């Protein structure tokens, strides 16, 4: 039962009890306190019996180890998720309790390569209720839990038109233009800064929203955050919406209540923004010189406008967040260990001697150190929690039976920093581990263990484009700019301030100074 429905029934029960007592033959002047007392007594008894069952040896997950308080309620896990250090806490708990960890009344985390199977099509494990679209509107949209697998497959087929080889090739000139816009944005903001520094993460955020505005809406909404800043608070508003869905969503009944309260305002605002952007795009008569996502979603007129609005929000948030933060983390690692920055520049410059020439994507894909930089930033920066529901009659993971109805997720961060998958220095940024000779004869770099874009039928449909974006922007940056942290930059505080709640929030700013390299031109490109 939905949380808001249950709350409404409790209020009705209280009202019914009050009415019955108020008009009974044995009327008491304490009818309100009596009604309230009886309602509270029932609630306490219900909670007590539920708690007793969840802690009892008869519960299906009774033999799963984990903190006893977490067995009682998913509220603990929602709190841990909201604080942004869920991946670190889960990693520590797995070290204490082993590969199988009970993190809620019906939820387990599994730190084992065998858990990857839960994401495969063969496993037939649907997304958990934490993916349910808020508001009980039963909208069909990518990312969120669908009423049926058929609806997900049909919507994915529509989206996939944009991500074919031809669809992506139409976006590459837009990517190139927006990257030059980014370079000009960095220089302009540095010139306007009182201390001659810029927040590079903010520049990446604004770049990603501008590019997504082009990709999703053909530029119809003219976001232009790199030029105008973010007066609508799109970036942090979007991140807060993701945080709420990811953390509060681990307790679905609470998410139902939050939807009706002011604290859920960030989600409402993003949905309203999506609606406004969709309607603006639908009214545009002059189309962009390339096909945007909306042109595919509206091609046959079968997708309801409510679904279009939610798909638009998913595309903007999903398409901007992971790439922008991964590039920010890559530059953080590169600039705090400058030898990697110089090595990457040397590799890219050898492939593209003219820093002003176009960057061919087929060539970029073949640069091993560039690929290593991207993979290391993803490995260390995307510790996502991706829960699935075990269907009847249950499933086996590493020989252990998991009862039907159990919510199960791979401990992604633990796998991505496990010495069995990445060795040596699994907690360090070492892009050379991905090169042919790695870090020595005992090097391990298990690409299959990285869950940044998920796996199976629900894997990110835009994965290939995201890789192209990151390769292109990083290559153009190192060819064009010298980038160095400001003197007061605290690298340790920055890394300790990386929080993850299906989006990444940085407690510290990535403050840098940039200097254009000799002979580089960035003005007037494609304008």
Image (spheres, grey):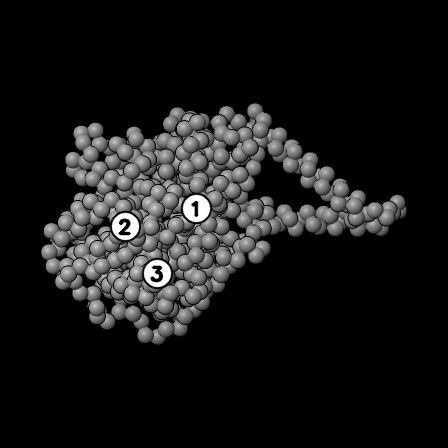
Q: Is residue 351 above or below residue 271?
A: above
Rate crowding at label 1 as few (under 14), some (14 to 19) or many (20 or more) other CA atoms within 10 Å. Answer: many
Q: Helix, strand, or loop for circle 3?
A: helix
Sequence order check, earlier mark of 3 and 2: 3
Q: Helix, strand, or loop for circle 1?
A: loop
* Cα distance between the residues tagged 3 and 2: 16 Å
Q: Which mark is residue 501?
A: 1
Rate crowding at label 2 as few (under 14), some (14 to 19) or many (20 or more) other CA atoms within 10 Å. Answer: many
**Residue with the mark numbered 2:** 331
Residue sitting at the far bottom: 285
The image quadrant where one finds the N terminus is top right
Q: Is residue 133 above or below residue 386?
A: below
Q: Residue at x 39, y 42 (%)?
A: 496
Sequence order check, earlier mark of 3 and 1: 3
Cβ atoms at labels 3 and 1 below 8 Å apart = no
Q: Is residue 321 left or right of residue 351?
A: right
Q: Is residue 327 above or below residue 521?
A: above
Q: Which mark is residue 299?
A: none
**Residue 80's spot in the image, x, y percent?**
49, 40
**Residue 399's spot in the image, x, y percent?**
39, 25
**Residue with the mark numbered 3:** 206
Examine the image and state in which quarter residue 88 appears.
top left
* Cα distance between the residues tagged 1 and 2: 21 Å
Sequence order check, earlier mark of 1 and 2: 2
Q: Is residue 10 above or below residue 103?
A: below
- For marks 1 and 2, give the one nearer the viewer: 2
Cβ atoms at labels 1 and 2 below 8 Å apart = no
């Amino acid at each position: 039962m939905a949380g808001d429905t249950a709350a409404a029934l409790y209020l009705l029960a209280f009202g019914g009890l009050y009415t019955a007592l108020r008009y009974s033959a044995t009327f008491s002047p304490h009818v309100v306190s009596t009604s309230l007392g009886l309602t509270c007594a029932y609630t306490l008894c219900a909670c007590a019996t539920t708690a007793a069952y969840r802690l009892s040896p008869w519960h299906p997950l009774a033999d799963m180890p984990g903190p006893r308080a977490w067995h009682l309620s998913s509220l603990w896990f929602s709190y841990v998720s909201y604080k942004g250090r869920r991946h670190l806490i889960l990693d520590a708990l797995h070290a204490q309790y082993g590969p199988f960890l009970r993190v809620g009344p019906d939820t387990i985390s599994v730190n084992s390569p065998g858990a990857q199977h839960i994401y495969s099509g063969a496993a037939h494990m649907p997304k958990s209720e934490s993916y349910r679209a808020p508001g009980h509107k039963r909208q069909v949209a990518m990312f969120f839990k669908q009423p049926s697998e058929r609806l997900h497959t049909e919507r994915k087929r529509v989206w996939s038109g944009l991500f074919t080889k031809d669809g992506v090739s139409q976006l590459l000139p837009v990517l190139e233009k927006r990257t030059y816009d980014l370079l000009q944005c960095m220089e302009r903001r540095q010139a306007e800064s009182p201390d001659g520094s810029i927040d590079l993460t903010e520049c990446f955020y604004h770049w990603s929203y501008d590019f997504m505005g082009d990709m999703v809406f053909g530029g119809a909404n003219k976001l232009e955050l790199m030029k105008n800043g973010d007066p609508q608070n799109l970036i942090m508003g979007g991140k807060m919406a993701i945080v709420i869905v990811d953390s509060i969503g681990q307790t679905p009944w609470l998410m139902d209540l939050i939807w009706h309260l002011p604290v859920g305002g960030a989600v409402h605002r993003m949905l309203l923004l999506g609606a406004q952007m969709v309607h603006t795009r639908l009214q545009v008569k002059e189309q962009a010189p390339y096909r945007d996502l909306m042109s595919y979603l509206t091609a046959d007129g079968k997708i309801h406008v409510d679904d279009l609005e939610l798909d638009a929000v998913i595309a903007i948030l999903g398409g901007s967040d992971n790439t922008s933060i991964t590039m920010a983390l890559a530059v953080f690692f590169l600039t705090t260990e400058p030898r990697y920055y110089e090595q990457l520049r040397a590799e890219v410059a050898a492939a593209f001697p003219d820093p002003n020439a176009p960057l061919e994507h087929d060539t970029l894909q073949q640069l091993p150190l560039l690929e290593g930089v991207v993979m290391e930033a993803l490995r260390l920066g995307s510790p996502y929690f991706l829960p699935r529901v075990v269907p009847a009659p249950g499933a086996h993971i590493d020989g252990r039976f998991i009862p039907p109805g159990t919510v199960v997720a791979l401990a992604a961060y633990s796998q991505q920093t496990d010495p069995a998958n990445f060795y040596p220095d699994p907690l360090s940024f070492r892009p050379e581990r991905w090169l042919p000779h790695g870090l020595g004869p005992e090097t391990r770099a298990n690409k299959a263990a990285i869950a940044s874009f998920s796996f199976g039928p629900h894997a990110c449909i835009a994965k290939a484009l995201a890789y192209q974006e990151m390769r292109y922007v990083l290559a153009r940056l190192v060819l064009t700019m010298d980038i160095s942290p400001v003197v007061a930059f605290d690298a340790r505080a920055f890394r300790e301030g990386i929080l993850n709640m299906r989006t990444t929030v940085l407690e510290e700013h990535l403050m840098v100074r940039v200097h254009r390299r000799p002979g580089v031109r960035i003005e007037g490109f494609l304008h």
